[in-house]
Image (cartoon, rainbow, N blue to C red):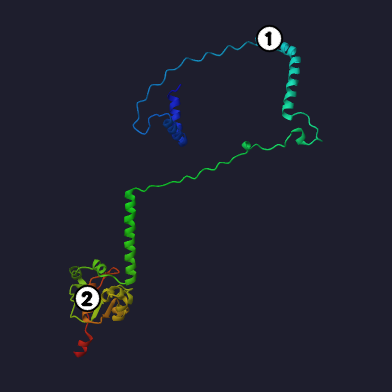
Amino acid sequence: PPDGNILNNIVNSLIAVPRFYNQVLHLMNKMNLPAPFRMALPTPPLPSQGPLPPPPPPQPSMTEKLHLADLSSDESEMESSDEDVDKREVKRAKHEAIVGPAVDRSVAHESVGVKPVALVPNELQVIKKKNPVLQIKIVPKAAYKELADRSIIDRELASRDEQLEEKHFATPQEIEKEKLPTEEILSLPMFKNYTPGNPASVLYIKNLVKDVVHDDFYYVFGSVFESLDAARSGLSIKLMQEGRMRGQAFVTFPSVEHAQRALNLAHGYAFKGKPMIIQFGRNPGASKAS
């Protein structure tokens, strides 16, 4: 009967052996027992102990064993002759049943009804193959919606990247995000006396990073021309890369209107971490007239 130690050992086996735990669940299901997936029920009382088994019979003493051995030896001597005759008859019957009657080897097997031995099909080993199990995973609606939204966002990002790759220049919205306000620029000591100057087709740009190149100006001012090719053909760039003028540039535009739009667009734009300070340069025609 179950006791506390037996039940504890069974619980330990359920924890240690997952297959045993699964088999117990199947057995409870077959026996229509309530499912264990809920709050613990009160423990029922253990069954009462049954009657104790009867004690074993007393062992005979040595004198009784010797006496019984003498009696058995006498009886065995008297019955040995009869048992020997019976054993020989049983052996002969078994030999005939296994080997069969004597057969003349010169006679064909078919004439005496003996057929060659063949394996019975039922005795052949059959290898059973497990049928493949098809697993179908059902995605919840929320997860499916999240995947759909993610795919839409990925497509939008990919299309935007493709558009940027085709343009190869910064959009006005991107430049506006990285611009410093005019008040913040004027608060810097080195630019407190900043004025844009008189409108001209030449822009004087300073406070540039040291590694700036010509293509960077096409990237910044490309949106003024609506295409990169138009920017390359319409801009004339003189970049100072040595001496005290390093980090400054003179960019000539096709017209004053283009230069005005470019100044309004990029003045204060933090290009590669430094704000571009843009002023109108001297108009070549005006300098010649003077």
As measured in the structure, the alpha-carbon distance from the residue carrying label 1 to the one carrying label 2 is 133 Å
Q: Please name whichever residue, 143 or 216, is drawn nearer the observer in this view of the structure.
A: 143
Q: What residue appears at the point 76 percent right and 17 percent down from the top-left corner?
A: 85
Q: Amino acid at mark 2?
A: Arg
Q: Amino acid at mark 1?
A: His
Q: Which residue is mark 1?
A: 67
Q: Quadrant of the C terminus?
A: bottom left
Task: Give neighbour class at mark 2: few <14, some 14-19, many 20+ (Cα, 10 Å).
Answer: few
Tell me where residue 217 sits by quadrant: bottom left
- Give the total of numbered labels: 2
Q: Please name whichever residue, 206 or 226, is drawn nearer the observer in this view of the structure.
A: 226
- Label 1: element kind: helix
Tell me where residue 21 sits by quadrant: top left
- Residue 51, percent across and down? 47, 14
- Residue 162, percent across and down? 34, 67
Determine whether, in the image, residue 5 is placed left or right of residue 168: right
Q: Please name whichever residue, 221 or 41, is drawn nearer the observer in this view of the structure.
A: 41
Q: What residue appears at the point 33 percent right and 61 percent down from the top-left corner?
A: 155
Residue 155: in sight, yes or no? yes
Q: Which residue is mark 2?
A: 261
- Label 2: element kind: helix
- Residue 135, percent across and down? 44, 46
Residue 213: in sight, yes or no? no
- Residue ranking furthest to the front: 111
Q: Is 103 drawn above or below residue 170 in the view shown? A: above
Q: Is 2 drawn above or below residue 227 in the view shown? A: above
Q: Nearer the viewer, mark 1 or mark 2?
A: 2
Q: What residue appears at the point 77 percent right and 34 percent down from the top-left corner?
A: 111
- Residue 222, percent across and down? 28, 74
